[in-house]
Amino acid sequence: MKKSIFLKIMLTIAIMAVIFAGCSKDGSENEQPVVENPSEEAANPEDDKSKDESSDYGIKINEENVVFTDESGKEVTITKNPQRVVVLQNSLLEIWDQAGGKVVGRVEESEDKIVENAMSAEVVGSMGAPSLEKILSLQPDLIIISGSYSAQREMVPSFEQNKIQVINLDNDILEDYYKTVRMFTAITGREDLYENHVSNIQKKVDEIIAKAPKDKNYKAVIIFATAKNTTVRDSNTMVGEMIKDLNVINISDSVDAGADTKTFSIERILQEDPDFIFVQTMGSDLEKITERLKSDALDNPAWASLTAVKEDRYIVLPKDLYLYKPNDRYPEAYEGLAKMIYPEVFSE
């Protein structure tokens, strides 16, 4: 009897041991392996590829090239570090030079921009009439043109037929300048120049804008005068954008929406009675420009009744900052206007 009971107990123990061994085995098979660095396990191979790329102002910067949409609306891919570059606009040439770029060809220097580092480069004509033959003779691997000039735009098919990379740009307003510097420093591989150059300029401009009073509600008109005609400019133009940033109302913004250069109307100016009249002049014949201004505005008997005229706020803007592109002098241009508009805030 005792022997029988003992056998039953031993058999029960053996069965229980088998059951526990099976459970232990099943559990170990279902365990997840230990990952010492989960982030490495989850990393996507595509993520490593994306680390070689960055994007600012719609510009994609890769290891060997730079991709962006140019002024013509076409996506362009430019190989980094081109060796033979021709630039057909002096303002763009200045930015290219400040981005660490060198050139083998340029257009005639003008009173607005003389780039000393480029003076030894071959002259290929003027901005308005460059020579296709001279440009091609330099065997460039990159040509930078200004979309403002039809003669330059018309040459693009010839450049492309000769397998030459082309950048078509317009450097009109502050955002264009920032984008151009970003693009050029990416192409030249000078990230250090981008950080030091644009960051400092943007910081200074932003500080000036932030300091401008918001409660004055001043109104202004920008008159653009040449020997042939007189027009007005709205906020889509360089100076127009600046005064808007400084919280000044441009009376031309509500007229003929969509056009940045508008018909001059002495009647509208008299009606709006602006606090400031800013004048831009273009051309070397100052006498003829003055005659045009007198004929269109200054000789009108009602002109002297304008608030801007009576309070000595009829201001002819200096060309170096307000007709030609200020580029790295944008802070100086903004500060100059701020001092004209808010002398009590932006005093010396």
Image (cartoon, rainbow, N blue to C red):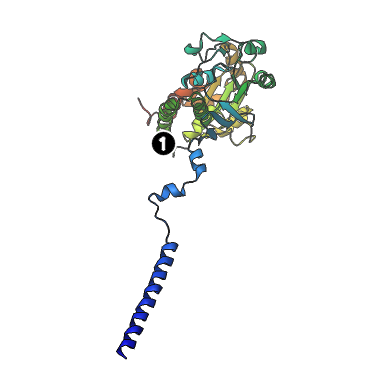
Which residue shows up at 39% across the image and 73% down it? 18
Q: Secondary structure at mark 1?
A: helix
Tell me, yes or no, if residue 335 can be seen here.
no
Q: Nearer the viewer, residue 46 or 189?
A: 46
The image quarter containing residue 71 is top right
Q: Quadrant of the C terminus?
A: top left
Count all numbered tags in the image, as a single digit: 1
Q: Does 35 appear above or below 18? A: above
Question: Badge 1: few (under 14), some or many (20 or more) residues near its Cα, within 10 Å?
Answer: few
Q: Quadrant of the N terminus?
A: bottom left
Give the image location of residue 241, x and y in percent: 52, 31
Side (left or right) of 259 relative to 305: right
Give the image location of residue 268, x and y in percent: 61, 32
Give the image location of residue 286, x and y in percent: 56, 12
Give the image location of residue 168, x and y in percent: 61, 25
In the rendered image, the residue lying farthest to the bottom is 1
Tell me, yes or no, if residue 139 can be seen here.
yes
Q: Nearer the viewer, residue 121 or 4?
A: 4
Residue type, numbered disc 1: Ala
Q: Nearer the viewer, residue 145 or 270?
A: 145
In the rendered image, the residue lying farthest to the left is 2
Side (left or right) of 320 relative to 255: left
Q: Does 43 appear above or below 314? A: below
Which residue position holds label 1?
210
